[in-house]
Image (cartoon, rainbow, N blue to C red):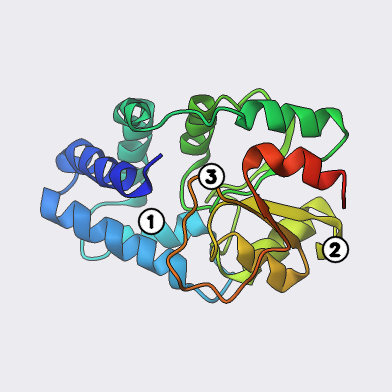
């Protein structure tokens, strides 16, 4: 996907859907406030969902129950229309199933900014929903977001591995490569590369997603 286009359309769709709950200008402000809170949080006392809800609702008279109902309605309806702004990677499904066939444990370590049903929907769009994922990271279960190393620490604890036993594959030079802070080796997929020039990390391996299986045979 073109991330900027997708996020623009996501915000527009959410604003339209939430108009029954709060004025449109307030929705945009609430989204920005909540996402900023998630990306800058430094403590693990609340899940990302709890943090998102708390900051989204600041200054409103609505309850978390009101918001959850509105969000569920959005993700079950309008959100699905955003598929038009995405297309499946031509080899993603093939590569994922190939690695599973080789016995690799598969973790979908997406940034936990969204609820589980939103991530599952996007997995359908990408054609990887039927892979044997051991774990999928969503905002209900995690307390930090990339590039905070706390995200990867929490993930490693859940799967019972240390960093040296894992490989992070991703296309974001800051968010994904930050896994190296936990000793996780990284593979930077140059397909749809996201590089904002703000990363202090270097990948251990680099190439197209289609090159990943061959790379793994050399590790």
The residue sitting at 80% across, 55% down in the picture is: 166
Mark nearest the camera among 1 and 2 is 2
Q: Secondary structure at mark 2?
A: helix
Mark nearest the camera among 2 and 3 is 3
Q: Nearer the viewer, residue 23 or 94?
A: 94
Q: Nearer the viewer, residue 10 or 59?
A: 10
For disc 2, the marked residue is 164
Q: Nearer the viewer, residue 90 or 10?
A: 90
The residue sitting at 21% across, 60% down in the picture is: 29
Residue 209: x percent and y percent? Answer: 64, 41
Residue 95: x percent and y percent? Answer: 70, 32
Residue 120: x percent and y percent? Answer: 53, 32
User: Earlier along the polypeptide chain: callout 1 or callout 2?
Assistant: 1
| Contact flag, marks 2 and 3 (Cβ < 8 Å) | no
Left or right position of 81 against 145: left
Distance from the alpha carbon under mark 1 to that under mark 3: 33 Å
Left or right position of 98 against 11: right
**Is residue 23 visible to the viewer in this orientation of the structure?**
no
For disc 1, the marked residue is 53
The residue sitting at 50% across, 28% down in the picture is: 88
Residue 132: x percent and y percent? Answer: 74, 29
Left or right position of 219 against 98: right
User: Earlier along the polypeptide chain: callout 2 or callout 3?
Assistant: 2
Q: Secondary structure at mark 1?
A: helix
**Is residue 18 visible to the viewer in this orientation of the structure?**
yes
Q: Nearer the viewer, residue 122 or 72?
A: 122
The residue sitting at 48% across, 29% down in the picture is: 121
| Mark 1 Cα shell of 10 Å, populated few (<14), some (14-19), many (≥20) | some
Distance from the alpha carbon under mark 1 to that under mark 2: 35 Å
Q: Secondary structure at mark 3?
A: loop
For disc 3, the marked residue is 191
């Amino acid at each position: 996907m073109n991330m900027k286009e997708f996020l623009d359309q996501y915000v527009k769709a959410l604003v339209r859907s939430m108009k029954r709950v709060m004025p449109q200008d307030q929705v945009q402000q609430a989204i920005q406030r909540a996402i900023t809170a998630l990306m800058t949080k430094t403590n693990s006392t609340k899940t990302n969902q709890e943090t998102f809800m708390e900051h989204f609702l600041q200054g409103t008279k609505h309850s978390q129950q009101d918001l959850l109902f509105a969000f569920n309605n959005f993700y079950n309806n309008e959100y699905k229309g955003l598929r038009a702004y995405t297309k499946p990677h031509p080899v993603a499904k093939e590569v994922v199933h190939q690695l599973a066939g080789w016995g690799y444990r598969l973790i979908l370590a997406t940034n936990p900014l969204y609820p589980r049903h939103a991530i599952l929907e996007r997995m359908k769009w990408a054609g990887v929903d039927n892979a044997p994922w051991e774990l999928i990271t969503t905002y209900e279960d995690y307390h930090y977001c990339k590039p905070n190393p706390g995200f990867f620490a929490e993930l490693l604890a859940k799967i019972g591995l240390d960093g040296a036993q894992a490989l992070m594959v991703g296309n974001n030079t800051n968010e994904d490569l930050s896994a190296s802070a936990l000793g996780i080796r990284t593979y930077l997929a140059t397909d749809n590369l996201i590089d904002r020039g703000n990363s202090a990390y270097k990948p251990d391996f680099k190439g197209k997603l289609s090159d990943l299986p061959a790379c793994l045979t050399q590790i």
